[in-house]
Image (spheres, rainbow, N blue to C red):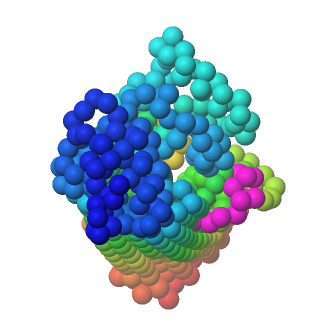
Amino acid sequence: MAVPNTGRFDIREYGAIDDSNDPDTDAIQTALDECAESGGTVYVPPGTYVTAPLRVGDHTTLYLDAGATLQFVDDYDAYPTVESRWEGWEQVGFHPCLLVDDAENVSITGRGTIDGTGQYWWQFYDAPESAIPEGLRERLAEFEERNEKQDDVSSFTHRPPLFQVVDSENVSVSGVTLRNSPFWNTHVVYSKNVTIHDVTIENPADAPNGDGIDIDSSQYVRISDTYINAGDDAICIKSGKNGEGRDVGEPASQITVTNCTVEAGHGGIVVGSEMSGDVRDVTVTNCTFTGTDRGVRIKTRRDRGGVVEDLRFANIVMRRTACPFVINGYYFTPLDSDPEPIDEGTPMVRNVSFTNITAREVETAGFFAGLPEQYFEGISFTDVRIDATRSLDATDLDPAMADDYEQTHGLFCKSIADISFTDVRLRTPGSPAMRFEETEDVTIDGLRVPDSQSAPAVSLTNVGRTRVRGCAPQSDGPFLEASGSETDEISFAGNHGSLAEHVEVAADSDVTIERS
């Protein structure tokens, strides 16, 4: 029953006992259900409370006091089968540990901890069949049978997320620690007006599919002042997969991420690869990414369709990142492929800007690859510093990421309609600072490379038009080298010294060089 005249529902009043091996599920769920009828606060006092999955309803604040832990049970039988979205598909799987479903005006807050006991679930990932309990095998077989659309997702992807918000509105999460998720840590799907503030998210490096926060076909989402140390992508933005995602047609949009700290993981901020319902209007500012495989990563592939557009990344510091900037249209597909007909499954990425960003101790400056049949558009860099002096070691990366990993320190660009660089400084020992292939329009204004660099600052192969302004030659070696029969026009204006004299043109190129 409720605490009289307070609107507070103390789970101890419903029979919850801390530090007991017996689950307190009935007590906690009853408190949540009664709170949802009238509105108020469900109070979790200090102590550890073991529980099966829980559901939070309307007009409810779930308050975990400092020292309080909700510890979810390590028993697959306690997790009912539910319909939800897993990695872009509408499918069935295990009930999330903590679920906000079809609810409004919900708050998860306090200084307590929500622990998914993920290690119980991780032990079965990629385990031989003989190591999986018979009952669990039967559940997974049920999922496979019912999930007919599942063409590239392991059945054991359907482990429960730790915290899921689905079909809900006006939800806030603040103060709490979310750790050890069986699958994704925090998943916001088909929801609006969601705020995640001052939250700690922790998954170990070897947690399979251990994403930090996944924003999926949701709008008006704000993430701020949050610390994430996850084994997979830290913050990921998605909107469904392939034809089904396009049919659902729910974009991920109006999303802001600010003042966040990411330590380790596959990516600091990642878009895709499930982006078939579109991703647009995203702003990421004032963040630090340390020890991530990627910093900012946009990934897609043929058949996804959808548009990623109007993304802004500013005031970010990265360190010990394998590659700080990636836009990849060839996720899990070969980079060198022939053009294919453009159809509804052809993805587009356009209007992406990077401003006031520093990346130090990185391996590769950047990787950008559109598709030969559909060049990506409108990529810009302003006031960016990249120190790509860390030793190259592709073995440091997850094998799934090797498709966009180039064995060069420099920035690589292919199949882009237009890309510009203003006031960019690059250190890429032993390789060109920038390498462009099959790109239509390149603008370079104020590029700075070390004076001692012997490799060309810029390498062009089959680039339609290149404009170079405000640059200076290094003391040793050419500033620019050009090759390819489709390399057409290079213009120099307002540079320091006779920069046009520091150009090497291959015999197969009939390029026109303009000076002013």
Q: Is residue 244 magenta?
A: yes
Say left or right for 509 vs 442. Answer: right
- Write the start and end of the magenta stretch as one range: 242-252
Q: Is residue 511 visible?
A: no
Q: Position of residue 53 (x, y in %)?
A: 44, 41
Please give the name of the residue rendered at 50% of the width and 35% of the height, measured from the top-left corner: 79
Q: Position of residue 341 (x, y in %)?
A: 81, 55
Please give the name of the residue rendered at 66% of the width and 51% of the height, measured from the top-left corner: 241
Q: Is residue 303 visible?
A: yes
Q: Using the image as rendered, state which of residue 52 and residue 436 is in the foreground.
A: 52
Please give the name of the residue rendered at 60% of the width and 48% of the height, measured from the top-left corner: 85
Q: Position of residue 229 (x, y in %)?
A: 30, 49
Please give the name of the residue rendered at 22% of the width and 51% of the height, measured from the top-left corner: 45
Position of residue 434 relative to residue 85, above or below, is below
Q: Quadrant of residue 143?
A: top right
Position of residue 385 relative to residue 166, above or below, is below
Q: Using the image as rendered, state which of residue 326 and residue 516 is in the foreground.
A: 326
Q: Quadrant of residue 454?
A: bottom left
